[in-house]
Amino acid sequence: MRIVLSYAASAPGHAALAAALDEAVRHDAEVIVVNSARADDGVTEVELPADELLQMDRSFAAAGITWRIMDSDPALFPGEAVVAIANEVAADLIVLGVTDRQHVEKRFVSRTTRDVLLDASCAVITVRGDKPPRLTATKGRVEATL
């Protein structure tokens, strides 16, 4: 099984990481991370911080999960990039974090979320990112404390 994780160094990204890690442990899956972080212009890709990558590596290693980062096409919007990579690797699941929205805003989703939900050819899990989880992972078991 292959899981594509749409990741940005944010509360929704951390929640998505925890969910992807949990799914990967339960299904003995490989995780492919797609950097969904963008600058304020919404287009320019932002490099993931080294400390985030180190924590991610430690979490996956502790759980015994194989993972890798795939670069996306800079001409694509983040959601389009996630779907393109999911198609390229024949993903079985996409995991992405979403922001908590107020009552009226709940009728709207971000462009990334919309693109993934409408265009993905595999299952999609969205995870609310109200608070960043603290991860504890061991082989066969993952705990996320919110």
Image (cartoon, helix red, strand yellow):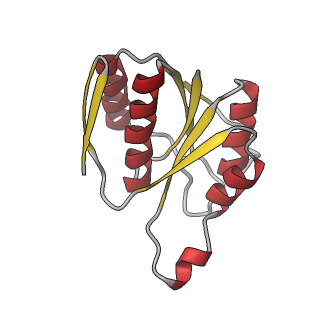
Residue shown at 30% from the left, 52% from the top: 132
Question: Residue 104's image quarter?
Answer: bottom right
Residue 101 location (% of width, % of height): 47, 73
What is the residue that sits farthest to the front in this orientation?
26
Q: Is residue 52 above or below residue 117?
A: above
Q: Is residue 139 above or below residue 23?
A: above
Question: Residue 32's image quarter?
Answer: top right
Residue shown at 69% from the left, 33% from the top: 86
On-image quarter of the N terminus: top right
Residue 119 location (% of width, % of height): 77, 49
In this picture, residue 104 sits left or right of residue 21: right
Q: Is residue 12 above or below residue 26?
A: below
Along the viewing direction, whichever of 112 and 43 lies nearer the viewer: 112
In this picture, residue 10 sits left or right of residue 34: left
What is the residue that sits farthest to the bottom in this orientation?
104
Residue 74 location (% of width, % of height): 71, 42
Residue 124 location (% of width, % of height): 61, 45
Along the viewing direction, whichever of 141 and 101 lies nearer the viewer: 141
Residue shown at 36% from the left, 15% from the top: 64
